[in-house]
Amino acid sequence: MKQLTRQIALLERMDQLVRLKATGRPKNLAERLQVSEATVFRIIDTMKELNAPVCYDIACQSYVYTEPAQFKCGFFVKGLDREEQRNLTGGYGFNNVRRLFDFNSCKSAQA
């Protein structure tokens, strides 16, 4: 698991540097990321496999995106609106059925 987390962190850092057009040459980037130059090329290949529009720009001496892009990986929590809450709990009718069962179990306990 640590290896996966490290790879994701490298992708996120590489994405940030690419968006800033601040990767520098592959050798410099490898030193900055504390990986080998071959690893830098593997990361770029992985980014391309994930459809990142990335290429090396000789003029800026940096990897750049040819169109707006950003790497996202992780879990994002969002609040549910009323409709999503209703669907998640089995609908409003589910609460009515549950109350009916609760009522019936109270009557059984009293008898």
Image (cartoon, rainbow, N blue to C red):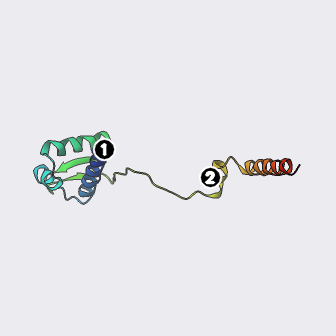
Q: Is residue 105 left or right of residue 61?
A: right
From mark 1 to mark 2, how far is it between C-alphas?
Answer: 32 Å
Q: Position of residue 78 (x, y in %)?
A: 51, 57
Residue 84: assigned label: 2
Which image quarter holds the N terminus?
top left
Category of crowding for the residue at label 2, using alpha-carbon neighbours closer than 10 angstroms: few (below 14), some (14–19), many (at least 20)? few
Q: What residue is drawn where x is 66% and y is 49%? A: 89
Q: Quadrant of residue 62?
A: bottom left
Q: Earlier in the sequence, mark 1 or mark 2?
A: 1
- Classify mark 1: helix, strand or loop: helix
User: In the image shown, does 96 or 42 lie closer to the viewer?
Assistant: 96
Q: What residue is drawn where x is 78% and y is 47%? A: 97
Identity, as a three-letter code, of the amino acid under mark 2: Glu
* Labels in figure, total: 2
Q: Which residue in the structure is indicated by mark 1?
A: 4
Label 1 vs label 2, nearer the camera: 1
User: In the image shown, does 41 or 57 lie closer to the viewer?
Assistant: 41
User: In the image shown, does 2 or 104 lie closer to the viewer?
Assistant: 104
Q: Position of residue 2 (x, y in %)?
A: 29, 46
Identity, as a three-letter code, of the amino acid under mark 1: Leu
